[in-house]
Amino acid sequence: MDTELKKKDKSLNQKEEPLDKNIKNIEADTKKEETCSCDLKKECDKECSKDLKKDKKIFKKENKLEQEITSLKQKNEELTNKLLYSQAEFANFKKRRELETSNMLKYANLDIVKEILPIVDNFERAIKLDDSNLNDELSKFLDGFKMIYSHLVELLKKFEVTEIDCLNKEFDPNIAQALMTIKVEGVKPGMVVEVLQKGYMLKDKMIRPALVKVSEEN
């Protein structure tokens, strides 16, 4: 009976051995799987890290490019504004030059006319003399003065010089200068009653104001 029991224990022990081996094998396989899984995770982490670095580089490049584009846009806008300002300045300069040239040609004879006007004044004073009491020689001399005066007046007309018409009109300080005031019956105040020296215009420009007497209140 004892021999049989021993045999049974041996057989049980022999049966238990493969079970332990199986468990060990499973544990080893699990460890292998875990090791494999860990290796895969490391590889995956490495790949993810590489991708992340690439993404960071790309982001930096994109950010740098955006900054450069913004800077270029600002520079382009500044240059465009400078160009527009320069063009406007040049256009204004061109207009000013054209106006100056036009005025220079328009009033080219201004200095000559100013030199002639005092001569005309002197001739006018001379021909205002009453030649009824003068002898023949002086009368002939005065006639010569009148002839020269008429030529000078015609010359001024060619230069487009016109006399300022202000006698018996309301005093205008833009074209006349009042040297004195006088009370005149029947004339309202502020009227030009006498022209002491004629004023002149060259085209649309006043070159000399008229010197006048103006009426005042009685």
Image: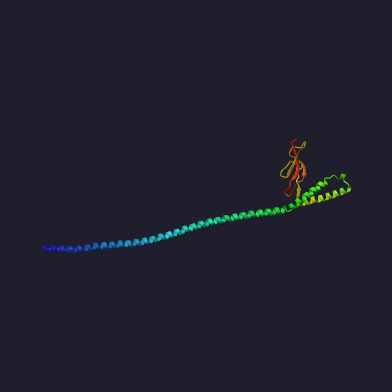
Rendering colour mode: rainbow
Could you say which quadrant of the image residue 133 lies in? top right
- Image quadrant containing the C terminus: top right
Residue at position x 41%, y 60% from top? 53
Residue at position x 28%, y 62% from top? 31
Q: Residue 87, how many percent across, how many down?
A: 61, 55
Q: Residue 52, how many percent across, how many down?
A: 40, 59
The number of callouts visible is 0
Q: Is residue 70 left or right of residue 159?
A: left
Frontmost residue, 40 versus 70: 70
Frontmost residue, 217 versus 91: 217
Frontmost residue, 3 versus 209: 209
Residue at position x 74%, y 52% from top? 111
Residue most toward the left? Answer: 1
- Image quadrant containing the N terminus: bottom left
Residue most toward the top? Answer: 218
Q: Is residue 27 left or right of residue 170?
A: left
Residue at position x 55%, y 55% from top? 78
Q: Residue 173, how many percent across, how many down?
A: 72, 43
From the viewer's perspective, is residue 183 above or below residue 103? above
